[in-house]
Image (spheres, rainbow, N blue to C red):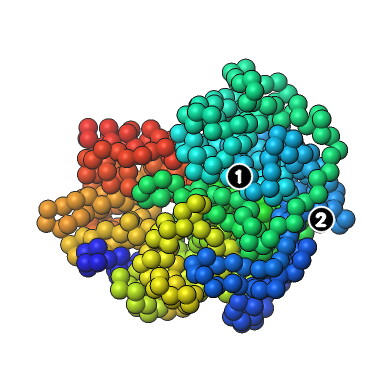
């Protein structure tokens, strides 16, 4: 790899100040003993501490089987059921405790106690069996944020049928691709759901996807959002079945949870690849469930008396790990919300937080930037008091972090930034909140038992404190790690392991997981993630990461969000183009443009001066909250737009293109 292609570069964003966790938080924390790191350094034995948090039908006899890297197997010989662990085992102590309090966008609410969840999961498991679902059949779900989604997931887990939830906002072709790749003959969907005041016809996407597959799907189970079927919903005879009709035949049924091997598949979660078809990350049962239970308790500091709200969608790994499996495994009361954060008003999130007395709030930097753009006046009418706030999805810029800390956390809540991926199953880099100081823009240290490193392009480790960024890698396996890419072991190796591993070796120490992100490690051991390796640009021989540029730009008071893309340049190689969203009520002006340019020149250097600064109404966010900078690069370089199906609003890139090429 040439120097021009290398992700190694000098990180120019200055290190930030420390913020100490409040004494009141430290005093109540689940983990306040720094010896936890020493316990987990007994590898792999330390991870048994997580496994002890769940109930096993048969205890494991092998903690880690690493005999066939990179196909690692955790807690071999152990047997358990994820549904039992999330529901049944809580009934004696927590039967009447709220598992989920759900709020629909129109304001309808449902409180689901663990006892209620138990009955409904059993009944839905009976429904699945009645239509022919057997152990190890992959059941595809295409459901929005309604209680029927976690209920169906847990029902699948109960009978040993792996589930593959496809985010409800995905299009019919995206759903069809995932159904086909998983060889899934069963699809569970819903007639409709609410979004920004509209009752949308959701099933039409399922219909189009199934038609595209020409008979590969045998059965479509259809939940109903209201008592009556959506007026536009079409039911196909012989294929489509209303869940409500089948439930009438299975009221009160009990289905014994299937005892699964720890290595048996729990679910598939499809994630977009940089090229080619989506990748079906396959997660097992024992290692994954142990890891998300442990991180839910230790990192998110969830106590039995807490109310927890992960403001994410279960259609993504964050929702699987930290709305469903992790929190339920430790008996948590969680909030779920169906709709848009600004409907019918921009204080809706804080209104819900006050109503349910939320203690722990878990969201993305994307959402925080949105709240910041709207302004703190939308928080002021509401009385809520978080003890713990989490960010997930993308690096959070220091200025955004400080706003979150000041206006949402009232300078009394801890903030835990996290780095992880669909493939890692759970958080792998973050500070345990009572043990380490917070530092804006830094994700923190490695989680207990996790061994990250930063490599240059030759596979040499970059020294902490050097100021040089490179490839973020993980040098030993952990229980939450994916097992493989479904049906494609070769791609699993080539995507994640091949570059820095000795693929001929059967020693796990010779295998290194490449995450695809660039990062820098400070002298204090804290990691700062700079973004995807693809988002690093070469400006006149200087390597620049998107995160450091964007962090400087959002320091400009009028700017709420920014994304930077590389524009080809005949002399410099590449130059940065800035796409900025202004605070609500602020009009674009030449003076703000000059402020942006000046901020970059002052904080990073004149060589990094943006070529163009475009003020746009919205950035191209994926439905999981990540900025798709690739599309902005295509706009900057006047290339054809590539696939936009994973965007929250697929029309945003074209609107930006029209603006840029008219101006």
Where, by quadrant of the figure, is residue 218 drawn?
Answer: top right
Where, by quadrant of the figure, is residue 79 drawn?
Answer: bottom right
The residue sitting at 43% across, 75% down in the picture is 505
C-alpha span from label 1 to label 2? 27 Å
Provide the secondary structure element on which disc 1 rests: loop
Q: How packed is label 1: few (under 14 Cα within 10 Å), some, or many (20 or more)?
A: many
Q: Quadrant of the C terminus?
A: top left
Residue that label 1 marks: 138
Residue 311 seen by the camera: no
Residue 491 seen by the camera: yes
Q: How far from the left and from the top, in percent, is residue 607?
A: 20, 62
Residue found at the very far top of the displayed protein = 231
Where, by quadrant of the figure, is residue 141 drawn?
Answer: top right
The residue sitting at 81% across, 29% down in the picture is 248
Q: Say whether residue 562 is left or right of residue 178.
A: left
Residue that label 2 marks: 90
Number of callouts in the render? 2
Whichever of callouts 1 and 2 sits on the residue coming sooner in the sequence is 2
Q: Between residues 469 and 136, which one lies in front from this camera angle?
A: 136
Q: Please say if 388 is above or below 271.
A: below
Q: How far from the left and from the top, in percent, is residue 72?
A: 55, 67
The residue sitting at 85% across, 48% down in the picture is 96
Q: How packed is label 2: few (under 14 Cα within 10 Å), some, or many (20 or more)?
A: many
Q: How far from the left and from the top, in percent, is residue 555?
A: 38, 56
The residue sitting at 48% across, 77% down in the picture is 507
């Amino acid at each position: 790899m040439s120097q021009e292609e290398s992700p190694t570069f000098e990180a120019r964003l200055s290190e930030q100040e420390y913020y100490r966790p409040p004494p009141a938080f430290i005093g109540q924390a689940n983990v306040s003993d720094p010896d936890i790191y020493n316990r987990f350094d007994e590898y792999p034995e330390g991870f048994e501490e997580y496994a002890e948090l769940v109930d096993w039908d048969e205890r494991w006899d092998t903690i880690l089987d690493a005999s066939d890297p990179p196909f690692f197997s955790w807690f071999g010989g152990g047997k358990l059921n994820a549904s039992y662990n999330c529901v049944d085992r809580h009934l004696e102590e927590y039967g009447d405790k709220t598992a989920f309090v759900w709020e629909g966008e129109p304001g309808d609410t449902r409180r689901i106690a663990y006892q209620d969840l138990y009955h409904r999961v059993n009944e839905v498991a009976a429904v699945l069996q009645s239509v022919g679902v057997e152990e190890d059949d992959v059941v595809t779900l295409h459901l929005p944020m309604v209680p029927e989604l976690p209920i169906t997931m847990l029902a699948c887990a109960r009978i040993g049928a792996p589930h593959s939830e496809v985010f409800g906002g995905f299009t019919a072709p995206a759903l069809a691709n995932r159904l086909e790749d998983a060889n899934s003959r069963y699809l569970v969907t819903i007639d409709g759901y609410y979004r920004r005041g509209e009752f949308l016809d959701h099933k039409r996407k399922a219909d189009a996807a199934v038609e595209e597959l020409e008979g590969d799907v045998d059965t479509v189970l259809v939940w109903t959002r209201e008592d009556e079927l959506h007026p536009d919903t079409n039911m196909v005879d012989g294929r489509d079945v209303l869940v409500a009709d089948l439930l009438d035949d299975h009221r009160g049924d009990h289905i014994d949870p299937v005892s699964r091997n720890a290595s048996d598949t729990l679910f598939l979660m499809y994630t977009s690849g940089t090229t080619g078809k989506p990748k079906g990350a396959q997660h097992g049962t024992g290692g994954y469930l142990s890891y998300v239970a442990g991180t839910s308790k230790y990192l998110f500091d969830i106590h039995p008396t807490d109310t927890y709200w992960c403001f994410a969608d279960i259609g993504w790994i964050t929702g699987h790990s930290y709305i469903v499996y992790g929190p339920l495994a430790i008996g948590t009361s969680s909030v779920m919300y169906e709709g848009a954060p600004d409907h019918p008003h921009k204080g809706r999130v804080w209104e819900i937080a006050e109503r349910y007395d939320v203690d722990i709030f878990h969201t993305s930097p994307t959402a925080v930037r949105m709240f910041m753009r709207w302004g703190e006046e939308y928080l002021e009418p509401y009385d809520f008091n978080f003890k713990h706030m989490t960010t997930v999805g993308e690096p959070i810029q220091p200025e955004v972090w400080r706003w979150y800390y000041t206006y949402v956390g009232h300078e009394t809540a801890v903030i835990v930034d996290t780095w992880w991926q669909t493939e890692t199953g759970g958080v792998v880099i973050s500070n345990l909140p009572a043990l380490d100081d917070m530092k804006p823009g830094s994700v923190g240290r490695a989680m207990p038992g996790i061994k990250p490193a930063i490599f240059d392009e030759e596979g040499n480790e970059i020294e902490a404190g050097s100021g040089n960024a490179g490839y973020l890698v993980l040098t030993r396996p952990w229980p939450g790690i994916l097992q493989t890419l479904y049906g494609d072991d070769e791609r699993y190796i080539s995507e994640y392991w091949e570059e820095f591993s000795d693929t001929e070796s059967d020693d796990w120490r010779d295998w290194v997981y490449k995450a695809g992100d660039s990062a820098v490690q400070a002298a204090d051991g804290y990691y700062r993630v700079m973004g995807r390796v693809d988002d690093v640009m070469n400006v006149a021989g200087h390597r620049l990461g998107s995160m450091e540029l964007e962090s400087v730009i959002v320091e400009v008071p009028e700017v709420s969000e920014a994304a930077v893309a590389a524009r080809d340049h005949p002399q410099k190689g590449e130059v940065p183009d800035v796409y900025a969203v202004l605070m609500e009520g602020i009009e674009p002006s030449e003076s703000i443009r000059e402020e942006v340019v000046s901020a970059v020149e002052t904080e990073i250097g004149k060589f990094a001066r943006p070529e163009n600064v475009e003020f746009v109404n919205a950035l191209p966010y994926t439905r999981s909250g990540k900025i798709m900078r690739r599309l902005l690069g295509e706009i900057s370089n006047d290339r054809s737009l590539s696939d936009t199906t994973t965007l929250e609003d697929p029309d945003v890139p074209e609107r930006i293109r029209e603006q840029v090429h008219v101006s």
